[in-house]
Structures are given as structure tokens and as C-alpha cells.
Image (tube, grey):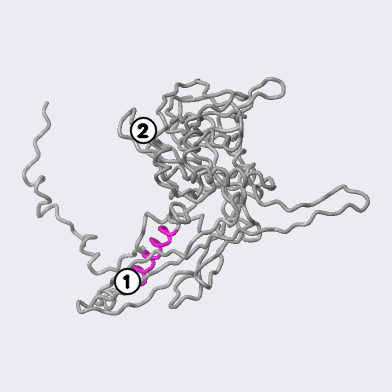
Amino acid sequence: MSAPESSPESAAGPTDEQRFTSLSTQAARQLATTTKSEPQMQAITSRWLLKMLPWVDIKGGTYRVNRRLQLRVGRGRVQFEQNGADDIKVIPQTLTELPALRGYSDTAALKEISSRFRVREVRAGQIIFDAGQPVTEAYLVVHGRFTRYTIGKYGEEEVTGVITDGDGMGDEAIGQADPLWLNSVRAETTGVVLALNWDTLRQFVDRTPSLAAQLDAFAQQQSKPMNRKGEADVPVQAGHVGEPVLAGGFVDYDLVPREYELSLTQTVLRVHTRVADLYNHPMDQTEQQLRLTVEEIRERQEWELVNNREFGLLHNVDHGQRVSTYSGAPTPDDLDELLSMRRKTRLFLAHPKAISAFFRHCNRRGLVPGTVNVEGHEVPSWRGVPFFPCGKIPISPQHTSSIIALRTGEKDQGVVGLHQTGIPEEFEPGLNVRFMGIDTTAIMSYLVTAYYSMAILVPDAAGILENVQVGRTAE
């Protein structure tokens, strides 16, 4: 049987007989005051980085980081331009990221060196070179993951590092008469490298006096006495007897220390006077507008502390303090290696998906990470170091991210936040709100500004685990 058709009256609405016999809620609300919430904002996060950083008050607006003289030149990463599968070139100016070419300014020579690299594809499992072999080529990694390993005392293979995009191999042989590879390197994935013939490089150096002088100065600097951190050594003597003549010396300082100027985030908040005058009960409209504006500025402040190219963590952590995951996914072994690179690691900072990926691998191994109490919150931890989520750490299109480890505080030569307190019309520490007046359209304007920066006092105060795959893998 077919269902009875609905009548036109029921489709159009209640008839006179069906109308309410008492006051409807819709009508009653016209005479009632609703209970309302303050304006909500989904983009507000926990901002753990801002909370956990010790903040140093910078009265002069600039913070100078004085360090001991560094003799060992740090390694950066080169960059490439690609116009096709076989047309890949290193950007000449980025060759100065290699230790031997740091500070070299002859653009023509850099272009000549970059033009002599040749593209070479490698397959997974291919041995690039073996330890003990003569160095015949220098390499730049365009893409791929390579394992640096050596043979242990009893014949077993020992992995000593992972090499990824932008890294170089071979420049450490500069200044040696007959250089030999100290480690073996194997491609773990298919990849692309740029290779430069060593004899070709030597011939070019012989014809370029400025380049020869640069490499000679680098070799002489590396031959000077230095401690295990690459700082100029101070001669000391221990275990002696009698009255030997003691060697003397001094602690030399870096003559060009880095200075950090306070950065800022600003916006102009506009509120119509009619809104401010008439619509302030039960909530002050100007106050609520200002509250959400400050929240947005603080969110951007944390983003800058992570991503800013001048002082942000992702761009300013020393390349010697960066390690890559061994297999892509973050494992307890990777976190242990990151921890081993510094003393007193106070916190890990990672995207929530990276934290989830790490704990998935703990689950697979049957490990139960602990927790620590931070400001009344039970925070997950590894080896007693708390894991704080930070959504400002980006996830690449390849679904990889980074995990940052920090030692904090001036006393421990760690990472510190920089701001200035006591500024005019201060609303919060380092943030002020200044009234800019009322224009001819009756709109009030307020200038809201936050001043801040960040300093890494010594290179090993911060480290990064890179190429962290955050996606799920098959069991």
C-alpha cells in the first residue's frame, strides 16, 4: 500500500487548531536576557614555547652574545636549482655554506666551481665510497638518504651518521696531500648527487689565487690547537711532578659577536565609537576586541620564534646539531641520539603529529614513556624530558617535520627569549597598546605591538631531529 499523501495544510505549517496554546520560546526570548559566552577563538593554542622560555629583559633594545673564539667552522647546507631531470645545478652563492668556502666572496670563482659538478643518480644500496679509499671526488647530495658507517673492532657495521639533502661530502679532505675517506657511505634510498672530480678542483685552485688563499687559510685555521668543541685552546698541564715550566695562554674571544635586535609584531585595532559607547553590557566590546587581538599577536610571536629566518629555531640551530632520522619515522634511538648531543636538555618541541608518530613506535616496541608534571599538567616525556606540542613547526608536503630539543636559560648557556619591559603604555610584558585617536568617520584606532626575539647562546643549546615522517606506516 502506498503511504497517504500529506495535506497542503500540514506542509504549509500548523493550522489554527494546531497553533501553540502558550507563549513560544521564540517570542519569550524577546523579553529575556540570554546567557552568553565571551567571543571564542579557535586559533588559540597552548603556546608552550612562550611559557617555557626564560625571558631576558633587554633595556637597550639589542642583545650581544659574546662567545669564545671558534676555530672550527660550522657546516651549512647548499641549495640547488632544477630545470629538468638532468639539469640540476648548485646555486653558487650557497657553496659558502661549506666550511672551506665560508666567507669566500669571489662570485665568478663560485660560479666556475658550480658549473663543474656533474649530475649522478644512485640506486638504493649503492656504495658511494669505502673507508680507506683515496678521495677522487667531492659530492653534494641533491636528494636521498645516505648512511655513513664504518667497520667496528670485531667486524660489525657501525652507523656513524645520516646524510640528506643539501649535505656535502669530501670538502673535509682539503689541505691534505693524499686524502683518504675515513668512513664508508651507502645510499639507503634512490637519490641524486652532484659529483666534482678532485683533480679538476685542484687544477682550478692552482689557477685561481684568491681560492688558493682561501683554502690555505682554512687549512691553517684547522691546524691550530682547539678543544673538542672547536674553540681556541687554552694550554693547561696536569699530572706533572717536580717544577716544570708551565705553558701560559689566555682565553680568546670572538671579535665579531652576534647581536640580536628586538623584532616586532604589530596591528591596528579599529573600534567604532558607537559600538564602544552603546554595546558594552554585559561585556566591554573594546576589551573583547583587544583580548582577541593580543591572542593573535602572541600566536604570531610564537610562529616567528620557530620560523623566522633571522632568529627562529628552525633556521638558526647550528647544522652540527642537526641529525636526521635513521629510517624516516621518529624512533627512541633517534631521540636518544638527539639527547646525547647536549647536556641538560630541558624540553622537546614537536608538532602534535610528530609526537603521535614517536609514541606509535614506542607502542610497537612495548615501551611506556613516562610523564612529568609541568605547571600542574601531566606532560608526556622521554628520558624525563617533557614533550610539548607546537603546531607552528611545519609539516612539509612530503609529510615530514622536525623535533626540536632545547636547553634553556642564561646560567646554563641555553636558549633565551628576549623582550623589553616597562615600555610606554605597556599592556603585557613586552607588549603595549597605544591610542592613535579618532578619525573623521568616528573610528577609534589602537596600535598593538609586541617586541621580542630569541638568542641561542652556544651552538649545542639547541638541536633538531630532521626528516621526521609523521604518516602512519604499515604494520
Amino acid at pointer 1? Gln
Where residue 446 appears, x then y in whole percent? 33, 73
Residue identifier under label 1: 285
Label 2 secondary element: strand
282, above or below 178, in the image:
below
- Residue 135 drawn in magenta: no
- Does the image show residue 379? no
Residue 202 as seen in the image, left or right of residue 442:
right
Residue positioned 61% across, 28% down in the render? 180
- Stretch of the chain drawn in magenta: 287-301
Closer-to-camera residue (43/123): 123
Residue 450 as seen in the image, left or right of residue 6:
right
Closer-to-camera residue (381/127): 127
- For marks 1 and 2, the one nearer the N-term is 2
Residue 195 as seen in the image, left or right of residue 240:
left
| Circle 2 residues within 10 Å: few <14, some 14–19, many ≥20 | some
Magenta stretch, main secondary structure class: helix
Where residue 456 appears, x then y in whole percent? 56, 55
Where residue 325 appears, x then y in whole percent? 53, 34
